[in-house]
Amino acid sequence: MSGYFDRLLSYFSTDMGIDLGTANTLVCVRGEGIVMNEPSYVAVLRSTKRAYRDRHGNVAVGLKAKEMMGRAPGAIEVVRPLKDGVIADFEITEILLSYFIRAVNRGRRFALKPRLVVSTPTGITQVEKRTVIEASERAGARSVYLLDQAMATGVGAGLPIQDPVGSMVVDIGGGTTDIAVLALAGIVRSTSLRVAGDKFNQAIIDYLKRRHNFAIGEGWAESIKILIGSAFPLEQEMTLEIKGTDLNANRPSAMLLSSEEVRNAFQEPVGAIIKAIAHTLEITPPELAADLVDTGICLAGGGSLLRGLDKAINAAIHLPVFIADNPLECVARGTGKALDDIELLAQIAQTTADD
């Protein structure tokens, strides 16, 4: 399909930017902004791997599916089709994408197949990229543009990515941390680390089991991270009563957990992210690295909200560190801005429009 014809059809379709994340999927519609933000969960029937439908015939995807975690009968499985930022289950990812496309188009005057701009982790393979494209096309996309997650972060954060000046982004999602130095609408140096929000949750689970012989689920781990988690000493440390299973007595129990202990549990994942940032800086050309003394390091993604993470990075790297405005939506906003600017999209994205 020619690029001109594709752009013409865009006037009659609801084009979308999608932050297809391990933990959450956000959809940005051209000219409207972010219209959907739901967990990347799908409920399927174990026997057929088809989407589970409730008594009203509605598929259980997103928040509805996540609410079924740990509560669904044995015939139903609740899964996340993406692992470490890439597609782990092709068919279930197709269900997820189809759900979002249909939901956005529902009730709209024009329902032509949309153009999609889909963010992908830095450094994924050509096979993984092809998987994203095929899943998107089978879900109903007319054409698919792949936008590197780090680049989407830079666009969404409003960084001067098209200028001859170095900008550094660190996007910490659910499955991956994407680190990149950007300049002249390109990625100069990058590192992708499969250490992110999920690894922080697992670190809490492992710590409690190892140190206290106490077992908790993913839901509690996520709550602990949000409520008392930190990467740097707090002015006032906190405690939280948590509930789980005492493995010594093999029965339900509760215990008091401190923010200091959670910080100890986070030492390994925080250290891995800081090490990856340092490595990226080491391989960055000196001229661009010098720019970062002024432009600093931009943090985005849900992981950037961990208390004191900016301070921990600053203390180790000795560069200014700041958190993007509304960091959870940064990548999705970047895909939306790219949809609004055809010239920018042509510069920074890979496309199937001319295949």
Image (cartoon, rainbow, N blue to C red):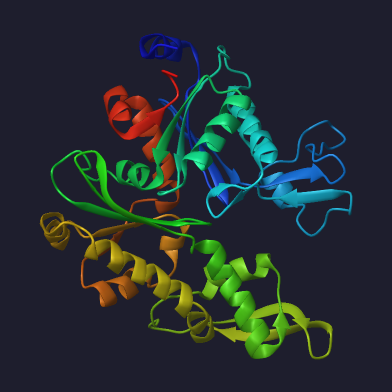
251 over 297 or under it: above or below: below
Q: Is residue 232 left or right of residue 284?
A: right
Q: Quadrant of the N terminus?
A: top left
The residue located at (66%, 50%) in the rendering is 80
The residue located at (59%, 76%) in the rendering is 204
Give percent across and percent down for residue 354: 41, 18
The residue located at (40%, 75%) in the rendering is 271
Give percent across and percent down for residue 156: 34, 42
Q: Quadrant of residue 179?
A: bottom left
114 over 284 or under it: above or below: above
Q: How many marks?
A: 0
Give percent across and percent down for residue 319: 21, 68
Q: Is residue 22 left or right of residue 52?
A: left
Q: Is residue 240 left or right of residue 353?
A: right
From the viewer's side, name the closer residue of 312 and 147: 147
The residue located at (53%, 47%) in the rendering is 21
Q: Is residue 197 visible?
A: yes
Q: Is residue 19 visible?
A: no
Give percent across and percent down for residue 146: 43, 34
Q: Is residue 161 left or right of residue 57?
A: left
22 over 90 or under it: above or below: below
Q: Quadrant of the C terminus?
A: top left
